[in-house]
Image (spheres, rainbow, N blue to C red):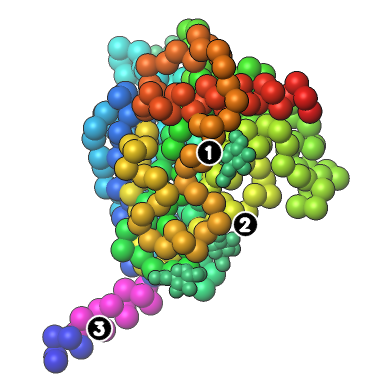
């Protein structure tokens, strides 16, 4: 009894001091090294790390203070000079010339995981966003939480080979990232700015729909909130780069029945597509079937563009 009371008081004390925390377990399932970057929002608790190397197959737990908000992404193809200076990355670079991002965010295009912990109603709000473009597949899985739509989100497919050519970022002949239409064309219509600065006037475009069809639960443009924001109470989070697509059909963790869209669009495999083959050679495709899906997606987009 007494010890239960002590535990309860400790718990209350922690609650009052706002130091109850979550853990992000960051997992690299890619067959290459990823350098995660983390940016804390203004006025939120700082983390023990803002950037580090995560070799293939490795995982790294990161303690997150309560009420933290911020974003996390993966940097790819990073290198530094022999002295360890001038650290730069082909995608997701944060511009510090160092491993740590120290308050700087990702240069687009980059796939982002965004969090606001202990927000309205005591709920964590989280999403995976392609609004700033895409650079690698990412999955967020809440662990041990509860709530209406406490379930997995992310973008599980490799969109780089299938990226429309006018959005594609190519390095050494290889497609390494896919820009948002806003970044590629800068128009108010795609950026949801100016007269397009509200959900009624800023509508999905053929470009945002390319992202949404491939990754139904990820943000594809600025006002994509209703199908892309998830909430959970009391969870830790597994954040995986290049998740195994075969074991993650539709978010088995948590309450996936409460959300309208699947994690993976399985119907894409049945769409059109004939001989769009050579453009999509890549060493980092998660599986043959997914590369097939994305080839079909490319031809579907071509068809859409031709007959729009
Ligand atoms: C970093 O790179 C720049 C440009 O390549 C070079 O001028 C500079 O000397 C490098 N800095 C260090 C510390 O190596
Ligand atoms: C799957 O993709 C097709 C087009 O490729 C699209 O028509 C359909 O709405 C998508 N389904 C989901 C659930 O996003
Ligand atoms: C999850 O729940 C929140 C709060 O009710 C809601 O705003 C959001 O649209 C829901 N997300 C999905 C993907 O259904
Ligand atoms: C799952 O979501 C449904 C619909 O929002 C809700 O009625 C149900 O209570 C939820 N189940 C759990 C375990 O949270």
Q: Mark 2 points at which residue?
A: 226
Name the mark nearer the viewer: 2 or 3. Answer: 2
Q: Which x, y percent locates residue 198? A: 78, 52
Residue 272 can be seen in this image = yes
- Position of 271 with respect to 155 (left or right) is right
View extreme (bottom): residue? 1
Q: How crowded is mark 3: few (under 14 residues within 10 Å), some or many (20 or more)?
A: few
Name the front one of labels 3 and 1: 1
Q: Position of residue 289 (x, y in %)?
A: 40, 27
Q: Does the residue labelled 1 lie within 8 Å of ligand 2?
A: yes
Question: Which residue corresponds to mark 3?
Answer: 8
Image location of residue 43, percent across then percent down: 51, 57
| Disc 2 packing (10 Å; few <14; some 14–19; many ≥20) | few
Tell me which corner region of the image, top left, top right, bottom left or bottom right, holds residue 55: top left
Seen in the picture, residue 74 relative to 202 is either above or below; the reply is above
In percent of the image, x 43 and y 29: which residue is there? 290
Q: Tell whether position 215 is magenta.
A: no
Tell which of 34 and 127 is nearer to you: 127
- Name the residue beneath numbered marker 1: 267
- Gap in Å between the C-alphas at discs 2 and 3? 37 Å
Count the numbered circles shown: 3
Residue sitting at x 75%, y 21%? 306
Q: Are discs 3 and 1 less than 8 Å apart at CB?
A: no
Is label 2 within 8 A of ligand 3 (CB to nearest ligand atom)? yes
Report the mark closest to the observer, 1 or 2: 1
- Give the quarter of the figure containing the N terminus: bottom left
Q: Is the magenta stretch mostly helix, strand or loop?
A: helix
Task: Tell me which residue sits at (31%, 78%) in the image.
Answer: 13
| Disc marking residue 112 | none
Magenta segment boundaries in residue numbering: 6-17
């Amino acid at each position: 009894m007494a010890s239960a009371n002590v535990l309860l008081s400790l718990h209350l004390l922690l609650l009052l001091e706002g130091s109850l925390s979550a853990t992000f377990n960051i997992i690299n399932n890619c067959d290459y090294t990823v350098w995660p970057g983390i940016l804390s929002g203004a006025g939120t608790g700082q983390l023990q790390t803002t950037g580090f190397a995560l070799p293939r197959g490795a995982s790294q737990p990161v303690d997150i203070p309560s009420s933290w908000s911020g974003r996390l992404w993966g940097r790819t193809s990073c290198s530094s000079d022999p002295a360890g200076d001038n650290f730069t990355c082909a995608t997701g670079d944060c511009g510090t010339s160092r491993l740590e991002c120290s308050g700087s965010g990702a240069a687009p295009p980059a796939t982002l995981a965004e969090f606001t912990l202990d927000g309205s109603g005591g709920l964590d709000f989280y999403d995976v966003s392609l609004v700033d473009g895409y650079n690698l597949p990412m999955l967020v899985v809440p662990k041990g939480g509860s709530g209406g739509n406490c379930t997995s989100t992310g973008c599980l497919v490799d969109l780089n080979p299938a990226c429309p050519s006018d959005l594609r970022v190519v390095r050494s002949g290889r497609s390494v990232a896919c820009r948002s239409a806003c970044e590629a064309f800068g128009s108010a219509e795609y950026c949801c700015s100016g007269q397009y600065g509200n959900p009624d006037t800023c509508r999905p475009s053929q470009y945002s729909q390319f992202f949404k069809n491939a990754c139904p639960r990820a943000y594809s443009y600025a006002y994509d909130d209703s199908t892309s924001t998830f909430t959970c109470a009391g969870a830790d989070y597994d954040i995986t780069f290049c998740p195994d697509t075969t074991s993650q059909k539709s978010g088995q963790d948590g309450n996936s029945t409460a959300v309208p869209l699947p994690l993976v669009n399985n119907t894409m495999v049945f769409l059109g597509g004939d001989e769009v083959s050579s453009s999509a050679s890549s060493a980092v495709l998660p599986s043959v079937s997914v590369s097939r899906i994305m080839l079909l997606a490319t031809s579907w987009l071509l068809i859409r563009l031709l007959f729009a």
